[in-house]
Structures are given as structure tokens and as C-alpha cells.
Image (cartoon, rainbow, N blue to C red):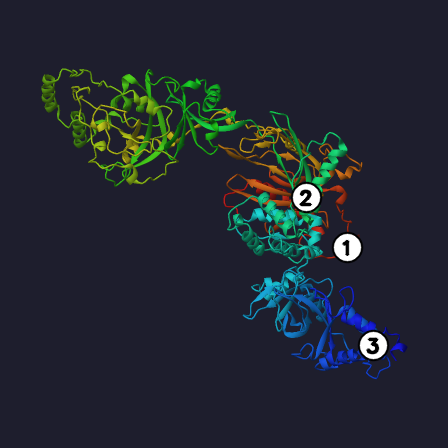
Amino acid sequence: MAAERGLPGLEAQRRQVEGEGPGERGLERPLRAGEKWYLLENHWYKQWKAYVESGDQNSSSFPGRINNAELFEDLESYRLKDRLVEHEEYVLVPEEVWNMLVSWYGIEHDQPAIERKVVDLPSMQKVEVYLVELYLCQHNDMDSFVMAQFSRMDIIDTVLKEARHQFCVPAEDETRLWVKNADGSCERLRNLQMTVLDACLSSGQVVIMETRSKDGTWPSSRPHIMKNSIDEEELYRGQPGVCGLTNLGNTCFMNSALQCLSNVPPLTEYFLNNRYLDELNFSNPLGMKGEIAEAYADLIKQQWSGHHRSIVPRMFKTKVGHFASQFLGYQQHDSQELLSFLLDGLHEDLNRVKNKEYIELKDAAGRPDEVNYVCMEVAEEAWRNHKRRNNSIIVDIFHGLFKSTLVCPECGKVSVTFDPFCYLSAPLPVSKDRVMEVFFVSMDPSKKPEQHRLIVPKAGKVLDLCCALSKHTEVPAERMMVADVFSHRFYKIYQMEESLSCILDRDDIFIYEVSVSPLEDPATADAVVLPVYLREHAQGRDYSDTYYGVVLFGHPLLISVPRDQLSWDAIYQLLLHQLSRYITQPDSEEEENQSEEEKEEEEDLYNKRPNGLSEGEEEEEEEEEEEEEETTVESSTSQEPSLEVEENALDASVGEEGAGVEGRPSPNPSPHRHSQSPQTPSSSPSPPTANQAKRKCRLPQKRQKLLFTLHHVNSNGTSDRMASQDEGSTLSFNSQPYLAMDWDSEMKKRYYNEAEAEGYVKHDCMGYMLKKNPVRLQECIELFTTVETLEEENPWYCPTCKKHQLATKKLDLWSLPEILIIHLKRFSYTKFSREKLDTLVEFPIQGLDFSDFIIKPRKDNDPSLYKYDLIAVSNHYGGLRDGHYTTFARNKDSGTWFYFDDSSVSAVSKSQIESKAAYVLFYQRQDKIHHPVPPTAAAAAAPTSTAIGQDSQEDYGACCDSHLSEQASRDFMDVD
């Protein structure tokens, strides 16, 4: 019987099945993970074994066809019976043994083979006899289940394919899986290449399949949206890609970067065609477990679905903040910084290299770089090494290659390396001059302060500022003092040798004409420069409390006082003269109408002496002192008192920063920090000493009415009951050189013309504007490739000198990518200053030619390999501390340019794209650009509901001129 069937000999069958002889075949060979083994009914196997051991091929014990019917619960579902025992009810045979037995004996009709796989458990390898039974359902109908069995070695993609098959999902629809946990929560099955075993799926669990909506959203991601709103969006039909992004609060930088990337054709098509699904890298320790790539894909699919006017990128913002803490919250950031993070995150999430090998970086290593073929070899080796660790869609379309040349200034060692790049950071030509606006205060009281616009060197000193002003005013620079005025105080009085970088553009700079040179030796100077503040007594205050009772007003003064006039009366008269333009003197009638009380107060004022004695008492006291001391100074018979001034007075008053002022003083400083108790020695009037001048003063017959009183104050303008005009004529500057003019509210109202005091005139130079000539983008690229010397903070280690050197460095462009990103470095940061460069950069919309910049030897003369067309621009309006980002982008389908301003989108013409706000430029190589086919007449005439239809393109273009000009002049404080 067996011979008729052409079966091998019985002994040969036994040896092949049981695995005797050389090789690892048969039942006795070890298990290997992933192999296929088959269940064989034990009764049939025993009968076969008896048959081959009998040695008689015609024996009646011939087993016949393989029959596993005893292993099934029924012959309809062919579900395996529970709790089958190996070697009693079945045996396991490897795939090759099963195939031999089936070829020799056949299998009962319609009986399926019971195939099982070897799984690799933590401590052993085992054939899984019982599969994992999962209940499959759809997201929109979670009450209808389909049971399916899967091996623990099956990948999740197998489960997804089975679910799509069971529910007849069209091939073009995108789906994803969720697993329902015992607590009712759902978890995404992100990694489709993960096995059922590694995903910890067990029998009885529910797996939900979700299908992406037509508008690009997932139903599970918008449970809070009302159904009618969802239906309205799905009914909307607009042009794909013409979709705004809602500003979540200072997120215009993110919206601008996303709109630029969204309009990069190869990257967008990569996500729209779901090619990213097969390249998600969930095991990369440098990546974000695929979450950034998935979040970006969701955003792109919504933007290009054509079902949204604008979308809310809240989920994407959350993901970015989760993986990059610097973007948490709602602070303003740089669009280029987010772009850099996003490209790096997408690259790592989509990196095709699962296990990165260590590669040692090498330079030319003495190879003759000047020989073209050797240089090519070094560059190709560098690119191969880069691709061995970094291979993704981002590398394919965004990465190029630099040639970096370092030269040691000491030994001449040359190091040549080739480094990959993702974008070019092109510097802008920076002007060496800056424009500063100042107010000049003349010593001539009849002249109003003049506002001047001066051009000075950026690296200049305060003396250069004074020299520039001297050309306009004909006042010598050495007779000027420069001060920063803030909140009616001197924040700082600059010295001539200080750098202009310490002065910011927003500072209020006053330059005062003085009679003494700040460069002159204070000890020999003929005059003293005194800072003077203006203060007003607040109504209803106790005037004895000189801190709470006064408020600063107006602009402070720097007055020059001759040394022979350093007395309260002389300074009072000098201030009256200096302020005569806006101070009115009381006339004779007003003086005669003074009340008796005021006259008595004035008599007391001029009768009192610093020691508190009356005139008669003082004479007696003087006689006693004259007898006791030989050093007594006779009283002067003149009405003006003489005065000694300590030499340190000028030192403290010329060119010094305000004492005790670390930062800008607050308008209302705490009284506990600046006021002193009247009982302290520093706050009480000092009694006259033997070396002080003494005088006898006759009461004048008629005294002019006092408009204000003078007080010693500190640099903040607060006084602490030091000597004042009321307390005598002695004026000392041993501690505080600052004075204050205290005005009574009523006197200030009657005699002080505030409008005139605040008035100023503009010099003719205020009409001058520093011309900033536009620069060509090619100039920026040339500046990028020029030789530079490394900074001290970043030296190069020379392997020949065996030490760090400030080498010269030159970067050259070796090869360029399909998509070239050019970052214009508009933000300049130094140790002392920060500024934004608003230079107009002229960049071509089409035909940017890099053939003059590529140093790689050319094999192909195709000019399109080096020419690029613009596809997107990220704009920044505003300054350093505040601003707004927008985007110009070319739609890949229609070729039309659009202006994206957060959720607002409008069509623009090419002539509107170039502006001073251009910050990041996106170019695409010409040979890779898809040029859209113009619509047919029928298609153009068909009605459409797109966001910007063909008929409305001209209307949008016409309105954009006014919109963009308004954008450029808007107030950018808190625009987001």
C-alpha cells in the first residue's frame, strides 16, 4: 500500500520525523523564537509510529489521512478545545515535519492545519498552543464585536489589518488602534511593529479601531466639539493648505514656523501619503517616542483636508511643551528656535537607523585636500558616516554639507572636516555707526532744551557723543556733562571714557553745558557742578517729614557754581537766573501784601543762626569764644556770607553715578530705606565749630519773597533733615552733593510755568535719518563664507601644538539640500547691547543661484541643480522684547502665494513678499518644484466654496497692500 503511494521507506520516515542522524531536523530539535510548529492528534501519531516500527508497508496499521478532529470543539468554527494536554491529546511537530507528513499521508478534507508559533518568554521558549483572543470593534460602534485570534508573536500591524478586513475599511482611509484596559481607560497602540506579547495584550481584551474623519481630525480628539460644529466643518470645502492657526496666547512664533513647514511640498506629501507610519522610531532614546511626528502629522492632515478655515493647535503645543520645557507656558519665543527643535524632533522620531553605531569623526588627516578626487573622497566618507547614524526624511530633504577649514595661527596646521547642516544662519552686514537722540541743555537760560539726533560709532565713548553734539552747538565737548534721566532723577551721570554701549536707545539722555570741564582736576577747578532736583510739597502733608511731604517733578538740573559763590543765597539767586525762562518773580505789590505772619517768619529766618541762637545771644556767645580761642574768624560786614568748601565736593558731583543707585530708582522708594530718624547724629544740625566762618548779619529793610527752599538730598531726591537753607548759610558737600528745590504747591502754581519748563525745540538734525541701504541675500551668503577668528570662549585644540589656539575658520558650501532654509541673523547680542537689525534684505523669489558658492567639483552642468525658488518666509515685526510673527507661503497645489497671520489667511502678490520683516527663508531647488497645471475653463467656471476662490483672488490681493502696511506699523506690545 505504502509502496504504491510512493512513500519513503518506513525506516527512512522514522529517521526523518524523529530527527535521527546529522542536522537539526525532526521532533528532537530545539525551539527557536518565531518558528512555526503544528499540533498533531496524538492517536494518529501513535498509529503512525506503530506503522513505521512494524516494518511492513502493507500493514493494516496504516494511519491514513491526518485527522485532528478530536482537538476541535466543533468542525464548524474549528476552535481548539480547552485544556488539551501535550503527549496525551496532541504532539507538536516542526514545520518541515508537518509538511513531510502531509505530503506522505494527506489531511482530512476542510480541516485547517493547527499552526502555532514559538514565543520567547522571559525565562524560556515555548510553543503557544492557545492564541490570544481579542474582541475587535469600531470607534463609532463599540457595541458590535468581532472575535479574532492572534499569536503573541504577531505584530500590532497584523491586528490592524485584520480589523480593517473585518470591517471592510477602504484602502484610502487611515485607521489606528486603541486597547481598552480593565479600568475602562483606553491606550493608543502606537508602535505597529510591536508584538502582541510586548504590547501586553491578553485574551478577552477589547481593541478599538478608529478611522480618521474627512476633515483630517480623529473623532477621539474632539469630544468637546458640538456635533453641529463638526458637521459644519465636514461640509466646508476650501483649498487644501489654506488654513489658519489659532493663536493660543503668544504662539504666533509657533504658527509661523508651522505654516512654513506645512508648505514644504516633499515633507507635506510624505505625511499626507502616510509614509511616516512605516518609519516611526519608538525606540530611539534621542527621539520623542514618535509622539512629535504623530502630532505634526495630525496637524498637517487637518490643514490639508480642505475642511477647515482655521484649526486650534492645542494638542501640538502640549506635545512640544512636554518634550521641550522652554516652550511651556505662553511666553513669546523665536520661530527659528522652534523650527530647529521641530526639525530635530521629527528627524529622531522618523530615523530609520534603529541602533546607532559609534563613529569617530575624522578630518582630512594630512590627505592632499587640494586634489579634487581626494577631497571628494573625504566628503563622501563624511556623508556616509552621517547617514549611518542619521537617515530620515528630514536628512533626505533638509541636510547639506559644509566644508570647514581651520588654520592654526602658530604652527600653520590645517584641519579640514565636512559637517552636515540643516539650515544656514546668514549674518547681516552691520553698520559701525548708531543713531542716538539726546537733549542739550544750554547754560543760557533763555534757550529751551534742544533735541538732537547724532550719529556716533557703536564702539565709541561718551566723549564721542559730546564731540558729535559740539558740531551742532559750537559748545566745546569738554564743557559738557552727560546724564541718564529717569523718573525726574539722575539715574547715572556718565564719565567721558565710558562706553556708549552702556546707553540703550530707550534711555532719556540729557547733555548739560557746564562751565567746568569734567576732565579738569577737581582740586583746581574754579567751579563746582551741582545736581539739583525739583520737588513739590504734597497737599495735606506734614512738612516736617521731608520724605512723605514731597514729590519730584520736572527735569533735574546740573548747574555750575563758582567756588566764591557757594552759599545758600548765591545758589538761590543762581537758580532764579537759570530758571528765569519759566519762573515768574513776584512783583512789588505782591511783596507789600505779605501778611504779618510771613514777615515774622522771614525775620526769624534771617535772625536765626545754625546754632539756634538769636542775634543778640549770638554776639555774646561770640565774645566768649573770641576770648577763649585764637582761631576765631571775624564776622564779615558784607551781607553775602563767605564759605569754605571741602575739596571732595567736586569729586562727588562731577562724573559720578548716583550714590546708592544700583538700578533705576523706583518712583516711590520705601521711606524706611532712605529716611533717617531725627534723633540720629546724621540727621540733626551740626553745631558750629571753631574753624567755621561766623558772621553778623543785619536784617534787610525789605526781603524778596522766597519762591522755594533748598535742601541737601541723596541721589534719589529724598532728604533726611540735613542742613537746609533755613538752617544757615554754611554749605558743605562732605557726604551728599545733591540739592533739591522744594516748592510749595501754591507757589509752584502761581510762579512756575510747567508747560514752558517742559518745552523743547527740535534741531534741524532731527529730520535726518540714517540711511540703511538694502543688502542682497548673496552678500549675506558671502559674509557667511568669509574667514573669521575664533572667539576666546571657543578655541580650537591644535593637535600639533598640543594646546588650544584662536584659529582662523572658514566655512564653504560643499553640497546643498533640496529644501534650503536660510536664517537671517537679525538679532544681534553682545556683552553690552542687544538690537534687532531691520535692514532690508533683497532676496529673489525665483532663480536664487548658488553656483558661485558651491565648491564641490561639478559633474553635471544642469543649472537647475544650483538654482532655487522661494516657497515660504517667516516674518518678524517689532523689536527685541515684543513682536509678532507671520508667514508668506506658496501653495504647492495652486502655486498661489498666501499671507498667514495666525487664524487669518489672505492671498498676496509676489511684490508684497519682500520686506524688512523677513526672518527665515525657505527655498526649493528648481528641478524638484512641481508646477501646477492651470485650471481648465470649465473648472474655473464651476462654483466653489473654497476659502479663497478663483474669483476672489484679485480682491484679496488688492486688500493686502493696506493690510500689510497696517501690520508693519501696528503696536507690537502684547499683540499676542
Amino acid of disc 3: Tyr
Query: What residue is at 80 percent from the left and 38 percent from the top?
Result: 862
Is residue 25 something one can see in this rendering?
yes
Where residue 37 appears, as percent x and y from the top left, is 73, 70
Q: In the displayed image of the protein, which residue is found farthest to the right?
A: 4
**Residue pointed to by mark 2:** 386
How far, Cα to Cα, is label 1 from label 2?
A: 47 Å
In this rendering, the answer to whether 564 lies above or below 214 is above
Kind of residue at badge 2: His
Residue that label 3 marks: 105
Residue in the picture at 58% in, 48% down: 254
Q: Point out the tag, 3 or 1, that comes first from the N-terminus.
A: 3
**Label for residue 228?**
none
Residue 793: % across, % down: 53, 33
Residue 71 position by quadrant = bottom right
Where residue 383 sits: x, y (%)?
70, 41
Residue at numbered disc 1: 939
Report, in whole angstroms, how far the alpha carbon at label 3 lies from the one at label 1.
67 Å
Crowd rating for badge 2 (residues with CA inside 10 Å; few <14, some 14–19, many 20+)? some
Circle 3: element type? helix
